[in-house]
Image: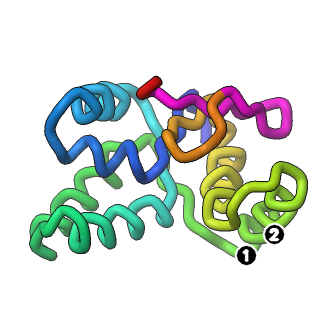
Amino acid sequence: MPAIANFLDTNILVYSTTGGAKAALAQKLMSEPFVISTQALNEFANVGRRKLGLSWGRITRIVEDMAETAEGVIAVEPELTMTALRLVQRYNLAFYDAVMVAAALKAECTTYYSEDLQHGLVIETKLTIQNPFL
């Protein structure tokens, strides 16, 4: 996979389906080349149903669209889990955040957009965490 600059966290996917300033920015990020992980799609489905009250049919259509629009979708595999375990210990990340960061590293992304992680943190000298809503 060629290097893609942007990896999008689940919160960007969620905001892209809502209204307001965060939605506009999330939609802008999704209009540029981006990579996501299967974990982000799964988390979106959960939030879409539980917090947004979307129907399963609507969630299915949105997830399909996100997966088709993305330049890449990184699957969570044992190798990613092992990388995440190393990242948890080195950067004191929550485990599921570390799995997403591991996916971004695997995709050779340089920017990870999320409001949930430490803005400006550089992972493995390759990946910079950016909170686009600051």
Q: Are marks 1 and 2 in contact (CB under 8 Å)?
A: yes
Decide if residue 65 is on the left or right side of residue 57.
right
Q: Is residue 125 magenta?
A: yes
Decide if residue 121 is on the left or right side of residue 21.
right
Report the span colored magenta: 120-132
Q: Is residue 58 magenta?
A: no
Q: Which residue is mark 1?
A: 78
Mark 2 Cα shell of 10 Å, populated few (<14), some (14-19), many (≥20): few
Q: Nearer the viewer, residue 46 or 67?
A: 46
Q: Nearer the viewer, residue 126 or 4?
A: 126
Q: Residue at x 62, y 65 (%)?
A: 96
Q: Is residue 65 visible?
A: yes
* Location of residue 71 in the rendering, given as x and y in whole percent from the top left corner: 44, 41
Q: Is residue 3 visible?
A: no
Q: Residue 82: which numbered mark, if any?
A: 2
| Label 1 – label 2 distance at C-alpha | 6 Å
Decide if residue 91 is on the left or right side of residue 107.
right
* Location of residue 48 in the rendering, given as x and y in whole percent from the top left corner: 24, 65
Among the 4 quarters of the image, the one containing residue 100: bottom right
